[in-house]
Amino acid sequence: MMERLTEPKIVVTPPGPRAKGIIERDSKALSQSLTRTSPLVGVETEDVWVKDIDGNVYLDMGCGIAVTNVGHRHPEVIAAVKKQLDICDHVNSCDYYTLPQIEYAEKLFPLIPWKGQKRIFYANSGTEAVECAIKLAKWHTKRYYFIGFIGGFHGRTMGALSFTTTSTSARKYFDPLMPGVYHTPYAYCYRCSFKQSYPDCGLWCLGFIEDVIMKKMVSPQEVAGILVESIQGAGGYIVPPNEFLPGLKKICEKNGILYIDDEVQSGFGRTGKMWACEHWGIEPDVICMSKAIANGLPMGACVARAEVMDWEGNAHENTLGGNPIVVSAAIAVLEIMKKQGLLENATRVGKYLMKTLKELMARHEIIGDVRGKGLMVGIELVKDRKTKVPATKERDEIIDEAFKRGLLLLGAGPCSLRLAPPLTLTEGHVDKAIEIVEGVIKKVER
């Protein structure tokens, strides 16, 4: 059992000797397509802390890419998994029925942002949830085409990858991908693809969809769905202006297009609301979810309006989706979030985090933009605030140096840091993280 911790602790410069040995073994055994942000070999976790194999302790401001929202190894999640292991480990849902699947659906559905009937398909990851949504949209609408957004990340299987445009490295050598996907710029106002300035732009990113894509490239009557992240995740934690998502929803309603909301990274209270789309009053037709759903156990889900999820038997199935052990963890997550008030904590501590980051920005020119909602916060780094030249090298140096001082940070987009800590984060944790970050920035600036 890990000792109770209150601050980062570096006992040997990381990566330590034991970590180096593991990394060497990894290089010979695992696919090296896996990119590692830091040379961390984590062996113990608790709440907001990660301990490595050499005894170093880190404050985790990424929580496995927005996964352990209720904190690492929450005792109630552990208890739920152990209880389920004692009675039933697996019954495949494409042949039989299981109780946890029904119980979870009935607990989750009141939290979905539309009043009508819902249906759920259980998957094993966010990518699988997106693949389900793609197939469902085609089946229901009998249409062929989709619209996605530049800078979006939706997964790496061939259908989901067709929408993923955070960089060319994820797509290189994999063509042809799933055909029929048109890409359009996201409402990234800090770096507008159209070189416009909000609000004088008139939200041309929406106008471009209707006036260019739907008039010159594909008929809206042939578009099955528009797939969008309410807040772009891997693209840089980009928060759109308030008119963007409601305008996108109107385009969908006008043309009978399904609004598919990818909440894989932004869901389960990450932004201070259960789903990020709720900040703009959006009621999607389909929601894709994963990551925090079972606090680290492999699970995803696609939830749709019942009239949309109308496909026939054998149209879409899997073997491991909705495994009883994993779903028992997911049920515990919902109960913990409510009991501990984690949405409220994400809102309160998120405001404090934004305040301290704005103050940090006032002291350091390398910070070009700070944005976010709740505990989904992006820090964009630039070489010059006027030219906005990306400070990619400096961003990576900050991540490396912070790691050496006991702070885990993740990158996003070309030059941003993404902060996605457990929703159990306190203001004291924020103070410690900012202290380390500022020390690192000063070193990098010098």
Image (cartoon, grey):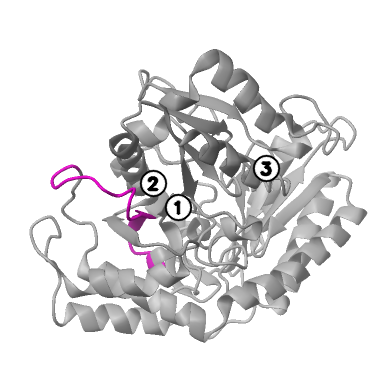
Residue 317 is situated, as x and y percent measured from the top left of the image, at: 18, 48
Amino acid on which disc 3 is placed: Phe
Q: Nearer the viewer, residue 312 or 177?
A: 312
- Stretch of the chain drawn in magenta: 294-315
Q: Regarding mark 3 in the picture, which secondary structure is present there?
A: helix
Which residue shows up at 71% across the image and 75% down it?
348
- Taking the magenta stretch, the answer to whether it contains residue 298 is yes
Asked whether residue 394 appears in the rendered view, the answer is yes
Is 427 situated above or below 130? Answer: below
Question: What residue did someone put label 1 on?
Answer: 20
The Cα atoms of the two marked residues, 1 and 3, are separated by: 47 Å
Q: Nearer the viewer, residue 121 or 380?
A: 121
Residue 63 is situated, as x and y percent measured from the top left of the image, at: 52, 63
Residue 78 is situated, as x and y percent measured from the top left of the image, at: 34, 80
Q: Of discs 2 and 3, which sits in the foreground?
A: 3
Question: What residue did someone put label 2 on?
Answer: 24
Residue 51 is situated, as x and y percent measured from the top left of the image, at: 49, 70
Question: What residue did someone put label 3 on?
Answer: 244
Do tag 1 and tag 2 residues touch (Cβ < 8 Å)?
A: yes
Residue 299 horizontal side relative to residue 312, left or right: right
